[in-house]
Image: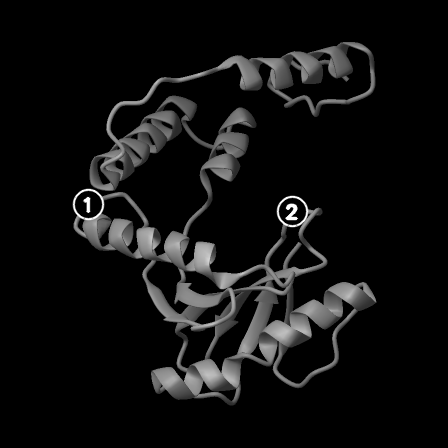
Amino acid sequence: MELERAAGQAAGAIPERDDLIQARAEALWPQIATQLGLPAAGARFRRFQVNSRRQHWRSVLEVRIPQGDRFVLRADFDGSPSSPFAGILQRHRAAAAALKPVHGVSAPAILWQDPEQPYYLMEFAPGDTAFRALEAADYGLGDRAAVVQNIGLAVAALHRVSAVGERQFWPKPFLTRISKRAQAVRGGQIELPRPCGAGALF
């Protein structure tokens, strides 16, 4: 779901609580723009889809200013402390700086961070997510092998700059989750979309 509106305009058919969260995030823009020397007026906001368990307290917006520049603003309004969040952003900054010269890897820089609350603004990284690229390839819109290879190269680059070293992989929780999902599919509780190929029967 991606809903767009200009600053100050009424929202469309958005649930009231989600609309409030988006309005609170949009209200941060004048302060951010002033601190970064960007125009506060005329910004347009487009809401990105958020995990349904977090949509009532998290807002992720694309911000587009009249000059054409685009940014991503994320704000969490769940009242969680900002100290762990600050550590996450610090690791993001380090990884983004190290990955900047790496070809084919999008590493958006953090441009602004609230000193007390879990709000931040970062560069807009164009292109699809790995999940969407794989999903499109499953429907014949792209080379799946190339997509998987690109994902692997990006993850390998991230590991090299993260200094995580070698770690033991424990697949049991993932296998348990996959097994439960497979049982649900076989039991008819989950219906999977089926891609339509040239030889598909309707």
Residue 152, percent across and down?
32, 28
Q: Residue at x 32, y 33 (%)?
A: 155
Q: Residue flagged by tag 2: what amino acid is it?
A: Asn
Q: Would you place residue 116 above or below residue 35 in this image?
A: above
Residue 51, numbered circle: 2
Q: Residue at x 48, y 72 (%)?
A: 116
Residue 159, percent across and down?
27, 34
Residue 181, numbered circle: none
Q: Earlier in the sequence, mark 2 or mark 1?
A: 2
- Extreme left residue here? 101
Q: Residue flagged by tag 1: what amino acid is it?
A: Val
Disc 1 crowd, CA 10 A, few/some/many (<14, 14-19, 20+):
some
Q: Is residue 66 visible?
A: no
Q: Residue at x 21, y 44 (%)?
A: 103
Q: Residue at x 40, y 52 (%)?
A: 88
Q: CA distance from mark 2 to mark 1?
A: 30 Å
Instruction: Confirm or deny contact between disc 2 and disc 1 (CB under 8 A).
Output: no
- The image quadrant of residue 151 is top left
Please identify the quadrant where the N terminus is shown. bottom right
Q: Would you name the residue on which mark 1 appears?
A: 102
Residue 78, percent across and down?
65, 61
Q: Secondary structure beneath disc 2? A: loop
Q: Nearer the viewer, residue 83 or 21?
A: 83
Please identify the quadrant where the C terminus is shown. top right
Q: Would you place residue 106 above or below residue 194 in this image?
A: below
- 151 left or right, relative to 191: left
